[in-house]
Image (cartoon, rainbow, N blue to C red):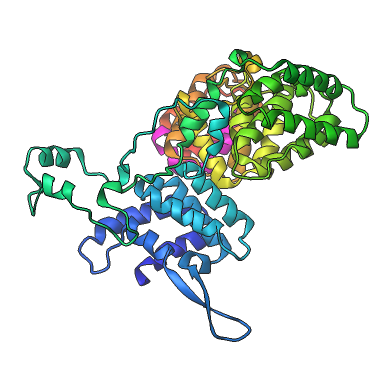
Amino acid sequence: MEQWVPLFDIFLNSPTPESEASTWLKQSFSASSSTAAPITTGSFLSLLMKPLETIDASSGAPSPNRVMFIQTLPNVVQARVLSFLALDRERFSGRELGKLARNVLSCDQGVDFWVQKSARHLLDVMSESNYEWISCLGLDSGEEEEEEEDEFESLPDWLKVSAAESDSVMPWLPISAEELNSRTVSGDDGGSLSQVGGDEDEDLDMDDVVEEMNIDSPKSVDIEPGVREKAISLKERVVSFESTSKTVGLANEIRELCLGKGGECFAVLGLIEPWLADDETASVLLSHLTSRSEEELTWPSQVLCSIILPKLLVLEEPASRVLMTAIVEYCRLHQRAAEYALLFPLILRQEGINNPIYDVITRVIKESLHPAHVSSFCQKLLCGEKDERRVICLPCHKYLITDKMVWTESLFSLLQSILNHNIPFTQSSVDHIVYQVQQMAETFSNSLKFWNFLLCLVTKCSPLLKPHKLMLTKVVELDKTFLAKSILCKIAGL
């Protein structure tokens, strides 16, 4: 346990625990290969999941309920550890990370809000959640999924080639391939070696799920005449607000019509056109169409992209207070849906974001999302491939969204707001931002928002900007505002 004290000290006291913990673990891993108790990613997870006995406070006797070691840590440390595991997940076993997150969420006692959000985020990025709802989209191919070997525990390619060329499985293992295939070697959980990483109920990959949602084509779905007539009648009621109680009843009817028809949900919402409702009606619909499960993605995404997203894509004036309150509350409950059905589409808006849209995104990021979720979102936004910035929207609104970011003053202001929120950026993210700054400096030579962002970037990310010192100095020569000297002073200190 003593060898892990410096790591937990980082989680407790460091302002940037994820990056420092990753560096410490890498250095300690290299230095501990010859020690009796090596520091490895596997041993760290084993420590976190180590079961401990508890004491009944009333009787002082041992309690039959056991807890994991991680659950004995302060809540802030638990949240930071889970966030670190999510960001540095490639170095750990995916199955073990999913098991840890599920055990934290299944605790009988109350779980801290941010610990719960961090655990859910870890499940999200590891794609360990059970997305059974994919079948309701009518996208099943009918073919049985092939069991895939856990990449973390698979053999290196060179060793696979060597094993294929030899009669024995390993040079030091005197068992032929035929003998091994004829045997059943069971572990503690009764699973055979040939089944490592291949559970029968293997969860669907998150990326595959979102990709399938993108190619969903409601236009090709034949809607029953009765359903079509009902949807058209609901559309008439959506645009005419009478009372809150009647709007609540309308929300229940929309839910029943959509969820009762499975794969036709997008098509039905396209007929109802709930985005035509005024802000008060939209806020009531949003609050009464909340999913019962925070882990669900489909229905919350469809609600956001059919009621809120179309309004915001054409927003030219500040959003009303009643609508913003409903959006913030809904996104806090459904953070993954907010990412794919609201944030990505707005930032990838065809004309770029403006000031009113900037205000909406800023509030959602600050008040609805966990910092680790925001950091992951920014990484995908700035450095992710096209298929990582997936957008969930109705087909009739796709023409308002592009696959590339449009760099406007408001977008730079948004990044500045995120930096001021102490969200850590990676080196690759900063490199991409610097490239865009270089490209846009001449265009925004008179923009205070642009140069204020650069001043903030140099202040917040100075360690990551050292390779760009000379280039940034040349960029500031284009600055025609009074901020030039302040920015140069900061750059000189890199």
User: Where is residue 335 shown, x and y percent of the image?
Assistant: 62, 41
Q: Residue at x 89, y 33 (%)?
A: 246
Quarter of the rendering occupied by the C terminus? top left
User: Where is residue 69 shown, x and y percent of the image?
Assistant: 46, 68
Front residue of 329/411: it is 329
Front residue of 494/26: it is 26
Q: Residue at x 63, y 32 (%)?
A: 301
The residues colored magenta run: 450-468
In this view of the protein, can residue 256 be seen by the observer?
yes
Q: Quadrant location of residue 44?
A: bottom left
User: Where is residue 487 shown, x and y percent of the image?
Assistant: 55, 34
Front residue of 415/465: it is 415
Compared to 395, does 377 lie above or below? below
Q: Residue at x 47, y 45 (%)?
A: 128
Q: Quadrant location of residue 451?
A: top right
Quarter of the rendering occupied by the N terminus? bottom left
Q: Residue at x 70, y 21 (%)?
A: 268
Q: How many marks?
A: 0
Compared to 62, does 43 lie above or below? above
Front residue of 105/5: it is 105
In this view of the protein, can residue 473 be seen by the observer?
no
In the picture, measured across the screen, residue 366 lies left or right of residue 97, that is right
The overriding secondary structure of the stretch rendered in magenta is helix
